[in-house]
Amino acid sequence: MTQTIDAQKDRLAGLRQAFHRDPELGFQEQRTKAKLASLLREFGLQVHEGVGVVGVLKSGSGNRAVGLRADMDALPITEQSRHNYVSQNPGVMHACGHDGHMVMLLAAAEKMAKVRDFDGTVVFIFQPNEEHGLGAQAMIEAGLLDDFSMDEVYAIHNLPGAPLGQVSTRPGLICSSESLFEINISGQGGHASMPQVGVDAITVGAEVVMALQTIVSRKLAPGAGAVVSVTEFLTDGQRNVLPGRATLKGDVRARAPQDRTDLERFMRQITTGIAAAHGVTVEMSFKTEFIETLNAKQPVEAVMRSAQALGLETIGDREPMSFSEDFAHFSAALPGCFMLLGNGETGPHAQPLHADTYDFNDALLPIGSDLWVELVRDRLPKRLED
């Protein structure tokens, strides 16, 4: 990557498509990491390889530093697209645009390394395993925030269906938390013709499923934005055998830590109560994978200024997203801003994230990289004497 950003649109697209052909799952991104590290070194950055890849670029004598994060893992999805750069790793696909996120940040790193029209330090963070909510915390535990002092941290995520290049974000909550639950019911199985002899776990489980749906509608304030979804219902029943055991698994989203705590409490009350009524035993686990993602006011304002300086459409008070984001661990530790960048309104660029026909819009690559560069100029402005 030796040309200017404006002259390299096709090359950026080629790089993105190369990442798309070779996706890797979370904490398995070895080839991806090696390619990122090689390119960052080619640009002249200090490169640190560990849990993820970190590139450091300094300019001037300023002591402020900003962190820019891109995620790099793919999903366990079999791609159904028909373009000429489909995944060559069976059952693994970049179905969330992390291939594009990496290239936008790489392109910005190259341009900043050439021009260096900022005063301070930029820390380029390439994070593994965002999809399971484990990568950010792993990098923090490995010393990222201790080894690389940063005043603020930022992340871009593409948004299918939104106009190409539209920048949207908001102060405060921007993404929901995600918690996974499992409920194990132990009753007494038996013959399908004599249900009165045992305690049918599938009937108890069905009652639990329906009762859980009352939490959001009757236990939380209207507009709380919480979601309780049972996604699996497993039993040991057969054609003429009533099940004695049932397992319910599912997903909970919340927009406030207190709501998340209340959701778990209400779920335990419901399952325990129904189990007692039917004389069965129940065990429940509730594990939060992603905490709520919170944006700080000044970083949000900086993103809006930077986008507007580039002539991009902006929305500074968008509705919070119901999906979850591992960036939450970074923005919980530092003032930060998670922003959304429109991926386009038609075709595969408008397909939902995680769809097996989704595709990142290559026309977004120079837009995103320019936004990163402008944001750094805003947060680390050159002094007049420089």
Image (spheres, rainbow, N blue to C red):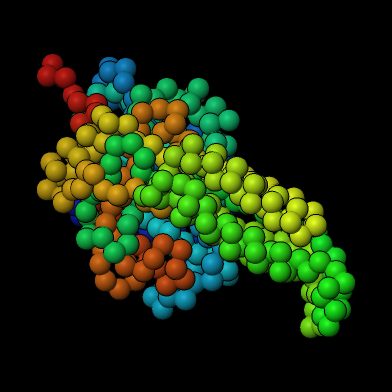
Please state if 252 lies on the left or on the right of 359 as rendered.
right
Q: Residue at x 24, y 38 (%)?
A: 303
Q: Residue at x 36, y 49 (%)?
A: 223
Residue 8 in picture, x, y percent from top left: 25, 55
Q: Residue at x 57, y 37 (%)?
A: 138
- Residue sitting nearer the eye, 253 or 29: 253
- Residue sitting nearer the eye, 351 or 232: 232
Q: Quadrant of the C terminus?
A: top left
- Residue sitting nearer the eye, 337 or 147: 337
Residue 73 in picture, x, y percent from top left: 51, 53
Q: Is residue 52 visible?
A: no
Residue 81 in picture, x, y percent from top left: 43, 75
Please state if 356 lies on the left or on the right of 376 as rendered.
right
Q: Is residue 229 visible?
A: yes
Q: Residue at x 19, y 26 (%)?
A: 381
Please state if 129 lies on the left or on the right of 67 as rendered.
right
- Residue sitting nearer the eye, 265 or 57: 265
Residue 100 in picture, x, y percent from top left: 37, 55
| Number of numbered callouts drawn | 0
